[in-house]
Image: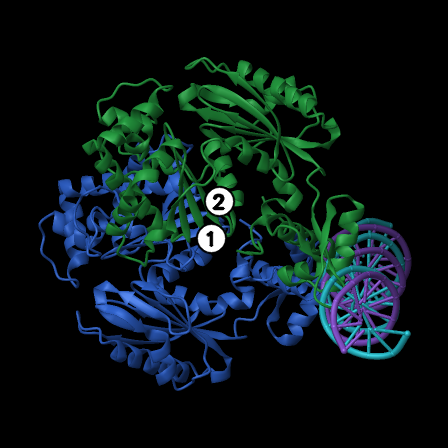
Chain colours: A blue, B green, C purple, D cyan
DNA sequence: CTGACTTTATTCGAGGCTTAGATTATGGTC
DNA sequence: GACCATAATCTAAGCCTCGAATAAAGTCAG
C-alpha cells in the first residue's frame, strides 16, 4: 500500500493547527504570545489560527494575566466541554466504563462485575454498550458531543474495523469486539477504538503521568501478567501488525518456565503477580493476588530478590534495544514492587547494562495508579483531535 | 530542547522534493507521469520540480520509452555523477575506504591492514585520512563533488561533533574519532558521519538489500560479535542517546555466560562467532574464525543446534517487542549459519512466538554479504540529499 | 489626569506552494 | 494529411505563513 506522502498547503495548516492545539493542551493555559514561542509559529499565524479555534469553540479564553506595564495577556485553553470521550476497561473481574471531558476529568462512571473465568464476548459487549448509554445519560452530555469510545482489552488486537481480539486469559480466540459493539450500539455512529489495555494505560502515563514530555520511553505494566508500551518519537510504536510492545513475552531465560502463552522463559512467566506467587509456592485466586503479593514483600521472601534481579535483566534488554529516555514501571504489581524496591530495581538494571550509557534514575514509577486503563482508552478517542498519530513527530516538549 | 515543529511553505517544498527524489532513486528511472502517480503530486508540480532538479543537475534524462499512440515518455533518473560519497569500514583487521557515486557504484578503494589487537586511534584516523585522499585521487573525482565521509566503527557512538566512540573490542574508551579526523583532514570542510558499523550495514540492507521496501524491520548482524539495526517507520531507530539497537546485548539467559561487555547472558555471549566457537571448545584467532565456524557447521556439532535454538529465542523476543514486517539476518557468521539452517532458525523462532501472529518466512537472509559496512557508511552521506532523517515518514514504498 | 512607555494582539501586503484545467509537444493510425 | 492518444508545460486561482505596521490595553511618573 502506498501511503502518499504528498503534502499540500492544507496539510501544512492541519499540521500546524494540531501542533498548536497540542501545545495548548499539554502546556496548560497560555497566551497567544507564549504559543507563538512554544510552536515557533509567527504571532500573526497564531492569531488567525486561535481566531478560528475560538470560533469553532475548540478553544476558550481562560482569564487574563496582567503584566507590568503592558497590555495584559489573554490566556487560552482547550475547551474542556468541546467534546467528551468514553473510556472502557475490560478487566479480569469487571467492565468499567467512564466518561471524560477533554481535560480528562471524569464525569460519570458505570461498573459491571464479571464472574471470574467467564468472559462471554457477547456479555462483555452488552455491558459496554449499556455502560456507554449509562454514562452518557448520567453525565447529561448531549450525545452528539461524545467523540467516541475507547476500549482497553487484554491480549492483542488486530487492526481493522472488526477489531479482532485474541486474549488467552479470557479464552478469546478471535473475538470481533469492534463488530459486536457496532452491532449492539444504541449510537451506531460513535467511533470505536479498541486497543490492548497495557497500551491504553501506557498512553495515559505518557500523556498525563510519569512519561509526560518524553519522546522515547518504555512503559512496563506489571499486573497479574506483564504488558508494555513502547514510545518512539513521542507516540506509541505499534509495528507492522499493530502488535508491538509485548514486553511480557520478552524472553529472559532460554528454556525456562512455561508461560501461559505456551513458550518458555517469557518475562511474564517470572514477573507477573501470578508467576511471582507461583514461584513462591503461594496459591491465590485472582481476587487475593494483591494481598498475597504484599505479604510476600513484607516477609522479605527470597523470591522477591530473585524477582528484582530478573526484572533488572528484562529492563536491561529493553535499554539496549531502545535506549530510552525513561522507563516507567506501572500496573498494580509493578507499583507494589517498585514502591518498596525501586533502588534495587535500578541497581539490578544497571548491573546488566554495560554496553551503553545508562542513567539508573531514568527508571521511575508510574504516577497514575492501576485504574488508568479507562483513562488511557479515552485518550484514543481524543488523539485524532490533536492530529492523530501524526502526533508522532513534533510534540512541543515544554518539559 | 524544543525542536520547533513549525512548518512553512518552504518546508513543504523541501519535503515534497525529497520525496520525489527518493521515488526516483529507489524506484529506478521513471517518467514524470509515473513520478506523479508514485508521489501523489500533480503532474504540474512534478514538471516544475523536475525542471529545477534538471537545472541543478541532480537529475538527468535516461532515454525515452515510446508508447502506443502518444507522446513518448521521457525517463529521468538521479544523476549518478551529481556527487560522490566515501564510505569507511573500520574493522578488526583492516580499515577499508571506498568511494561511491550516487548509484553506489564503487569507483575506488583503499585498504589498510591493522595489526590485530592494536587499534591505536590516531593510527586508525591517519589511515582513514590517507584513504580518503587516495580514493579521491584514484577516482579522479573533483574534490568539491565529494559530499562527505561516512565511517562505520564497532561499539557505540555518542552524538555530537566529536563523535565519541566506545568500542570495548578495540579498547577505545571515549575516542573522539570525529575530532581526530577533522584535525588531520586534508579536506577539512568535508562533512563526517560516524556511526556504529552494524547500523551502517543495516542501512545498506535496508536501502539496497533484503530490507528494501520495508517500514518496520530488524536487521541482525552476526559476525565475531552481534549487532543490529532497528528500522521503524522506514528509518533507523536510534533512541534517546542514538545508541538503540544493541541487539547483541539483549539478554537470553538470566545469569548466563559472561559477555565481553561484562554482563551475563547477552545474545552476543552465545551467538557471536567468537562465542559459538568458545562454546564448542574451539580455539581460533580472529583470522581463522570463519573457517573454524564453517567446520563446526559441516561437522554438525551439537553446539550448532543449540545456537539455532538460542537464536530463535532472541529473534522471538524481537518479534514480540517490535512486531516487524521482516527480520534480516546478516553478517558473515549469520550468513554462514543462515545459509544452511534458515528453515531451522525460522522454526525455532516460531516455536517461541505464540503471543502474536508470526510469519516464519519474514525471517530472511541478508543479500549484501559482509562487505557492506563501507557501502552503508556511504549512505550516511547520501541520506541528507534525500531529506535526511525526515526520510522517516513517507517512503513511497514502490515494492 | 495626562502623556510617554510597554507589552500584546491583529491586520495587511508579499512571497511561496500545489492544483485544476487549458495548452502545447510528439508520436501513431487510418 | 486529418485525427487521435499520451506526455509535458503553462496559467490563473486558492491557500498558507511571514514580516512590518497598526491597533489595543494597560502601567507609571510627574
Would you say the residues marked 2 and 1 are in contact, meaning their CB atoms lie under 8 Å apart? no
Q: Relative to D2, is B387 on the left or the right?
A: left
Residue receiving disc 2: B237
**Would you identify the image quadrant in which residue B357 lies?**
bottom left
Q: Relative to B212, is A280 on the left or the right?
A: left
Residue B70 appears in view: no
- Pair 2/1: label in front: 2
Q: Position of residue D27 (x, y in %)?
A: 74, 56
Q: Secondary structure at mark 1?
A: loop
Around disc 2, counting alpha carbons within 10 Å, would you say few (fewer than 14), some (14 to 19), or many (20 or more)? Answer: many
Q: Position of residue A253 (x, y in %)?
A: 22, 41
What number of labels is visible? 2
Q: Position of residue B174 (x, y in %)?
A: 49, 22
Q: Relative to A259, is B71 on the left or the right?
A: right
From what the image shows, is residue A158 above or below residue A296? Answer: below
Residue nearest the viewer, comparing A311 with A140: A311
Q: Secondary structure at mark 2?
A: loop
Which residue sits at x=38%, y=19%? B287
From what the image shows, is residue B206 above or below residue A100? Answer: above
Residue receiving disc 1: A212
Residue A130 appears in view: yes
Residue nearest the viewer, comparing B361 with B299: B299
Q: Relative to A190, is D2 on the left or the right?
A: right
- The disc numbered 1 marks a residue on which chain? A
Amino acid at each position: 500500500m502506498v501511503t502518499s506522502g504528498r503534502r499540500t498547503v492544507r496539510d501544512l495548516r492541519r499540521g500546524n493547527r494540531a501542533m498548536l492545539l497540542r501545545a495548548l493542551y499539554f502546556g496548560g493555559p497560555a497566551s497567544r504570545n507564549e504559543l507563538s514561542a512554544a510552536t515557533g509559529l509567527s504571532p500573526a499565524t497564531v492569531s488567525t489560527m486561535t481566531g478560528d479555534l475560538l470560533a469553532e469553540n475548540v478553544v476558550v479564553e481562560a482569564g487574563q494575566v496582567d503584566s507590568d506595564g503592558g497590555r495584559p495577556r489573554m490566556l487560552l485553553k482547550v475547551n474542556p466541554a468541546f467534546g467528551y470521550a468514553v473510556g472502557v476497561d475490560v478487566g479480569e473481574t469487571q467492565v468499567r466504563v467512564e466518561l471524560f471531558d477533554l481535560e480528562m476529568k471524569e464525569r460519570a462512571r458505570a461498573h459491571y462485575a464479571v464472574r471470574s473465568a467467564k468472559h462471554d464476548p457477547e456479555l462483555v459487549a452488552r455491558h459496554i454498550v449499556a455502560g456507554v448509554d449509562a454514562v452518557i445519560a448520567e453525565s447529561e452530555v448531549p450525545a452528539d458531543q461524545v467523540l467516541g469510545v475507547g476500549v482497553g482489552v487484554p491480549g492483542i488486537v488486530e487492526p481493522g474495523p472488526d477489531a479482532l481480539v485474541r486474549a488467552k486469559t479470557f479464552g478469546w480466540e478471535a473475538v470481533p469486539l469492534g463488530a459486536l459493539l457496532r452491532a449492539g450500539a444504541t449510537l451506531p455512529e460513535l467511533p470505536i477504538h479498541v486497543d490492548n489495555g497495557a497500551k491504553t494505560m501506557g498512553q495515559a502515563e505518557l500523556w498525563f503521568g510519569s512519561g509526560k514530555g518524553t519522546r522515547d520511553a518504555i512503559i512496563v505494566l506489571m499486573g497479574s501478567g506483564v504488558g508494555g508500551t513502547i514510545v518512539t518519537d513521542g507516540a506509541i510504536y505499534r509495528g507492522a501488525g499493530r502488535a508491538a510492545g509485548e514486553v511480557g513475552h520478552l524472553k529472559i531465560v532460554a528454556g525456562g518456565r512455561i508461560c501461559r502463552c505456551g513458550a518458555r522463559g517469557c518475562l511474564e512467566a517470572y514477573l507477573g503477580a501470578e508467576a511471582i506467587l507461583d514461584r513462591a509456592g503461594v496459591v491465590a485466586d485472582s481476587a487475593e493476588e494483591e494481598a498475597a503479593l504484599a505479604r510476600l514483600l513484607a516477609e522479605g521472601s527470597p523470591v522477591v530478590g530473585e524477582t528484582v534481579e530478573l526484572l533488572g535483566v528484562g529492563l536491561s534488554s529493553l535499554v539496549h534495544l531502545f535506549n530510552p529516555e525513561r522507563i516507567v514501571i506501572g500496573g498494580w504489581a509493578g507499583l507494589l514492587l517498585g514502591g518498596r524496591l525501586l533502588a534495587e530495581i535500578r541497581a539490578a538494571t544497571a548491573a546488566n547494562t554495560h554496553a551503553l550509557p545508562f542513567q539508573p534514575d531514568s527508571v521511575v514509577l508510574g504516577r497514575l495508579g492501576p485504574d488508568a486503563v479507562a483513562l488511557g482508552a479515552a485518550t484514543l478517542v481524543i488523539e485524532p483531535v490533536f492530529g492523530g498519530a501524526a502526533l508522532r513527530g513534533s510534540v512541543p516538549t515544554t518539559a
